[in-house]
Image (cartoon, coloured by chain):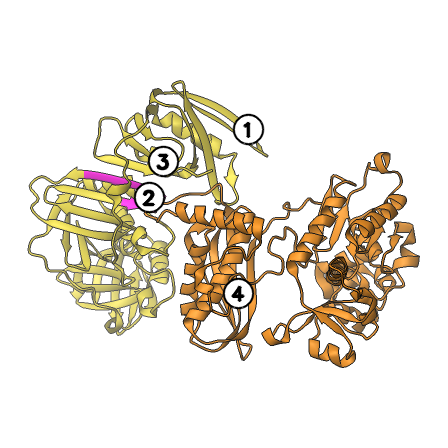
Chain colours: A yellow, B orange
């Protein structure tokens, strides 16, 4: 293999695929990034067997071939190279990088050992605008579970049913739901996509691009620009989320999202709960105001925000993060909150937009 | 305050009250397990039995060899719990601040009580006599300016005595004692100290603390302070001690080799663990099961729960799943169940998609209150009928709010 390319292009390729390199030590070969030169394209590939990322750069190729280089070392090298044109020449498993009048030789792995990233041949992919999908990810992904004991909750349910597209995430304490429309779509898809994959899509997706989704029963490929992200679906049954969404409420309030966010963040400074290992916040809704009177050994805070209130008064406690997370992603100035007493889930949604909904369970005390 | 040979005294006082003619305290006697159920060790002995060098924890067989006439009676933990509670009730009249340190040991903060009761020494005598009169057993009382010295004082000459051990009395009363007598010096530590020629508490007190620290780490400094009578631990009301986890275990009278019986044993442990958990107002987020095979091999597994629970049946279900992971059918002699990752049961984060445990909680609450009022055996699960197993097992005394054993004052 012999290719010519700029250091900047090279760095883009490495950065794109690097997140798929497993952080835990599994198979040694997976610690590598595969480079493959053919048809005037230089392909970068990395995989942890669940998630694979592949992208290409147009380069000048003098000799085709492939090589696998240790990801961590390789990316450090590329980062530290001078900004110049590079010539990369492979010889057996090893690579020589020529720059200015110097060269760096790196020992690689046997490319034969690198797992083949399976193609999905779908004649009829789903096509949708990137910006829409990116927005949907942003509004839901934070509600996924971090704890891996129940894999189903570490992913997002993607449900495409003709023109409707839904994305749902829950960690069993809260749930984020968003829906949108893909005009003219005829296809159907339903599967649980790992949050890690969605994070990578969010990171790499450009607003202007078009996203293509190809799928079979166990895998999905997301293609956009020169990037392909292939992921295994999470097996298992996503819970029936519809049954937990309240259909009515006793109190409906309208609050300035930014003000409420700031207040909750201030109040939560005082209240690190040792049992829950998180910050908690307790507030009352009464006389068209949200009232926070929080105290701990460290101090106390009293705040009041004017709101529009319909229905009965109540007092409620939350893991503060469950409120701040959602207030950060709702775009409208005013946020609707629908509650029924101190123990039922509270619904958060933007004003005049039925496509988004978030609900969180309060703390029980 | 320390009850003299607590279990045995209580047993003896109870028997006299029931019309027995023999006072167990006056003859070589002991409270011990039952060798047939493989719990054959001495739990407490009378002062005459002490003369035969019978030790707490030795097997009944070897105790009988030392003293063939030894009278052995079975333990009755319900009685001991009652005695302990009655004792505490008497003490509350003497001070508002009482710490129950174990089933038979109490600390009383007498600061400021002189105005009400007069000087501590005469009050102690009065208290000791009241207990003897009302409850029929004797106690030792140690008086001093901190908990360590008071405890050491109560251990001086027994039975039925009041001792003072004020700081100025340390060199004469405490320093001549063998180093093992010091609170916190157990078998392992005593060996380390004796190997270095430290034989008495006085030797320890005069040792260079940095030298002690070299082989006992920070514990050496603590012991050195103790040996010099220095201790500043406050008297804490019970419940103030943070509990990190709780568990019970039981030695089974026969080797268990079938799954159903093993699950029943776990159920009997889940009953007691669940009751303790609920009584303390906790839910547990982690369950662990341990087993000891007939070859004395020990294994354990644990599992984190998605939602913290305090329900007997939920704890049992998790324990059974753990048992299936852990056990391959070897004969079992001992099983244990432990819960930790505790959180307050009245303050927690609920979940969607979880089965509601409200009904279970109500059942547990009802059962707990029946057992509290009418005794632990008043109601039990029918699975135990004809099983040859106890419906509740593990835990010497079910409702303790104090540690069974501790080296922390």
Q: Mark 3 and mark 4: span between their CA atoms? A: 41 Å
Same chain shared by disc 2 and disc 1: yes
Same chain shared by disc 3 and disc 4: no
Q: Secondary structure at mark 1?
A: strand
Question: Which residue carries the number 4 mark?
Answer: B390
Same chain shared by disc 2 and disc 3: yes
Question: Which residue carries the number 3 mark?
Answer: A344
Chain name for mark 2: A
Q: Mark 2 and mark 3: span between their CA atoms? A: 18 Å
Same chain shared by disc 4 and disc 1: no
Is residue A107 something one can see in this rendering? no
Query: Is B168 on the left-hand or right-hand side of B334?
Result: right
In the rendered structure, which disc, 1 or 3, sits on the residue that comes first in sequence? 1
Quick check: is A344 in the magenta stretch? no
Is residue B348 something one can see in this rendering? yes
Name the residue nearer the viewer: B341 or B264. Answer: B264
Residue B396 coordinates in the image, percent (x, y):
62, 61
Chain name for mark 3: A
Residue A14 coordinates in the image, percent (x, y):
29, 56
Q: Is residue A52 above or below residue B386?
A: above
Examine the image and state in which quarter residue B218 appears.
bottom right
Front position among marks 4 and 2? 4
Residue A194 coordinates in the image, percent (x, y):
28, 53
Q: Mark 2 and mark 1: span between their CA atoms? A: 29 Å
Examine the image and state in which quarter residue A358 appears.
top left
């Amino acid at each position: 293999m012999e290719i010519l390319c700029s250091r900047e292009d090279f760095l883009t390729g490495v950065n794109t695929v690097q997140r798929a390199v497993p952080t835990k030590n599994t198979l040694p070969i997976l610690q590598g990034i595969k480079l493959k030169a053919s048809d005037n394209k230089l392909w970068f590939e990395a995989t942890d067997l669940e998630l694979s990322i592949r992208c290409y750069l147009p380069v000048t190729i003098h000799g085709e071939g492939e090589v696998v280089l240790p990801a961590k070392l390789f990316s450090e090298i590329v980062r530290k190279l001078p900004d110049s044109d590079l010539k990369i020449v492979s010889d057996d498993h090893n690579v020589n990088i020529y720059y200015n009048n110097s060269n760096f030789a790196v020992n690689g792995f046997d490319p034969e050992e690198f797992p083949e990233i399976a193609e999905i041949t779908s004649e009829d992919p789903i096509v949708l605008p990137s910006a829409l999908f990116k927005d949907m990810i942003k509004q839901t992904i934070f509600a996924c579970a971090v704890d891996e004991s129940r894999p189903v909750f570490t992913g997002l349910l993607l449900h495409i049913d003709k023109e409707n597209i839904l994305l749902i995430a829950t960690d069993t304490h809260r749930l984020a739901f968003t829906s949108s429309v893909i005009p003219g779509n005829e296809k159907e898809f339903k599967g649980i996509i790992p949050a890690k994959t969605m994070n990578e899509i969010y990171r790499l997706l450009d607003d202007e691009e078009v996203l293509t989704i190809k799928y079979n029963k166990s895998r999905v490929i997301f293609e956009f620009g020169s990037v392909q992200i292939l992921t295994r679906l999470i097996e298992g049954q996503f819970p029936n989320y519809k049954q937990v969404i309240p259909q009515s409420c006793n109190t409906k309030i309208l609050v300035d999202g930014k003000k409420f966010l700031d207040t909750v963040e201030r109040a939560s400074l005082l209240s690190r709960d040792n049992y829950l290992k998180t910050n908690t916040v307790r507030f009352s809704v009464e006389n068209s105001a949200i009232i926070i009177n929080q105290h701990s050994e460290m101090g106390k805070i009293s705040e009041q925000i004017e709101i529009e209130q319909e229905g009965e008064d109540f007092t409620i406690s939350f893991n503060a993060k469950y409120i701040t997370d959602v207030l950060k992603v709702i775009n409208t100035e005013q946020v609707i909150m629908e509650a029924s007493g101190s123990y039922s889930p509270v619904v958060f949604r933007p004003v005049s937009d039925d496509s988004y909904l978030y609900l969180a369970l309060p703390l029980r005390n | 305050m320390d009850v003299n040979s607590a279990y045995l005294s209580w047993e003896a006082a109870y028997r006299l009250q029931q019309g027995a003619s023999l006072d167990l305290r006056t003859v070589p006697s002991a409270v011990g397990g039952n060798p047939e159920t493989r719990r054959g060790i001495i739990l407490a002995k009378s002062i005459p039995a002490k003369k035969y060098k019978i030790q707490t924890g030795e097997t009944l067989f070897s105790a009988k060899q030392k003293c063939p006439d030894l009278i052995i009676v079975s333990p009755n933990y319900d009685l001991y719990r009652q005695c302990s509670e009655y004792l505490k009730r008497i003490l509350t009249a003497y001070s508002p601040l009482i710490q129950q340190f174990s089933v038979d040991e109490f600390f009383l903060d007498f600061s400021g009580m002189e105005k009400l009761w007069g000087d501590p020494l005469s009050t102690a005598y009065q208290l000791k006599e009241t207990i003897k009169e009302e409850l029929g057993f004797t106690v030792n009382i140690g008086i001093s300016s901190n908990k360590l010295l008071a405890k050491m004082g109560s251990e001086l000459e027994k039975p039925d005595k009041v001792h003072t051990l004020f700081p100025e009395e340390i060199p004469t009363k405490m320093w001549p004692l063998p180093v093992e007598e010091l609170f916190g010096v157990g078998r392992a530590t005593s060996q380390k100290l004796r190997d270095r020629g430290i034989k008495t508490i006085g030797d320890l007190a005069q040792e260079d603390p940095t030298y002690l620290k070299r082989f006992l780490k920070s514990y050496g400094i603590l012991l050195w302070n103790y040996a010099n009578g220095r201790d500043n631990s406050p008297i804490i009301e019970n419940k103030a001690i943070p509990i990190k986890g709780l568990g019970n275990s039981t030695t089974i009278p026969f080797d268990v080799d079938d799954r159903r019986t093993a699950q029943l044993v776990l159920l009997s442990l889940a009953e007691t663990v669940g009751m303790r958990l609920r009584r303390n107002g906790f839910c547990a987020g982690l369950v662990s099961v341990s087993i000891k095979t007939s070859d004395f091999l020990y294994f354990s597994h644990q599992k984190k729960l998605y939602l913290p629970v305090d329900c007997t049946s939920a704890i049992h279900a998790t324990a059974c799943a753990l048992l299936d992971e852990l056990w391959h059918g070897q004969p079992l002699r001992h099983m244990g169940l432990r819960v930790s990752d505790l959180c307050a049961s009245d303050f927690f984060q609920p979940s969607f998609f979880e089965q509601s445990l409200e009904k279970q909680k109500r059942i547990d609450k009802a059962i707990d209150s029946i057992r509290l009022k009418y005794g632990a055996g008043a109601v039990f699960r029918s699975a135990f009928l004809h099983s040859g197993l106890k419906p509740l097992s593990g835990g010497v005394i079910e409702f303790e709010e104090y540690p069974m054993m501790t080296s922390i004052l």
